[in-house]
Image: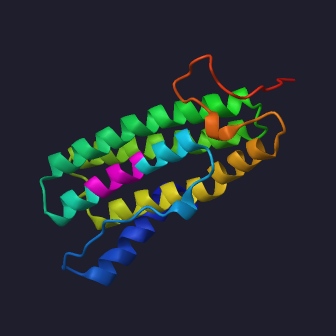
Amino acid sequence: MTFSLFRTRLILVFKLLIGATVMSIEFEWHKKWEIGVKSLDDEHKDLYDLINQAAQSINEQSSQENIIQILEKLLEHSKEHFRNEEYFMLEMNYPKRIQHTREHSMLVAETILMIKDARTSQTILDCGTVHSLKHWLLGHVLSSDKEMADYCINKQDCVPHKFNSTYSTTIECNFIVT
């Protein structure tokens, strides 16, 4: 199922469940969602916090423009995080790097479309939007990112908790690229 289809179905379910009432849609990060690569875990938490900012703005019935600005910030942070993650995968010669990168591209494209539709008033950003982003992030982190981190942890020459996401030359992994 594509993210767009998933998002549409999720929005419909939440609209049916909540009707016209406003509900709290902020989420709490749980340590069990960490993948074991500190720098990437920290970035995941930052992305999650931005989704919560969008949720808070919706709860407070902020303007559509305010919510769009938060989503634009989420988009920029996501792009930076994906670059870091893709660099990490490249450095450790991760065999599923291309598939993983496609998932990143899909989320970026969906988020750009969501923002564009909201700017042209074709979409109202509501709790369904936030829930779909949250579920996409968690689904991606707990499956694809966790699998990637486990691959690194299982490599004898990789120390994932010391990965430096700033692209410096002080990466503490001695990767062998074949």
Quadrant including the C terminus: top right
Q: Residue at x 24, y 81 (%)?
A: 19
Q: Residue at x 39, y 65 (%)?
A: 28
Task: Identify the magenta region.
Answer: 46-53
Q: Position of residue 165 (x, y in %)?
A: 54, 30
The vertical placement of 176 against 74, above or below, is: above
For this rendering, which residue is in front, 163 or 92?
A: 163
Q: Residue at x 57, y 63 (%)?
A: 32
Q: Position of residue 145 (x, y in %)?
A: 63, 49
The vertical placement of 73 against 25, above or below, is: above
Seen in the image, is 61 located left or right of residue 142? left
The chief SS type of the magenta part is helix
Seen in the image, is 171 located left or right of residue 11? right
Q: Position of residue 153 (x, y in %)?
A: 75, 45
Seen in the image, is 92 located left or right of residue 42? right
Q: Position of residue 101 (x, y in %)?
A: 62, 38
For this rendering, which residue is in front, 78 or 156?
A: 156
Determine the image quadrant of residue 17: bottom left
For this rendering, which residue is in front, 154 or 12?
A: 154
Determine the image quadrant of residue 125: bottom left
Q: Residue at x 34, y 60 (%)?
A: 129
The vertical placement of 89 against 35, above or below, is: above
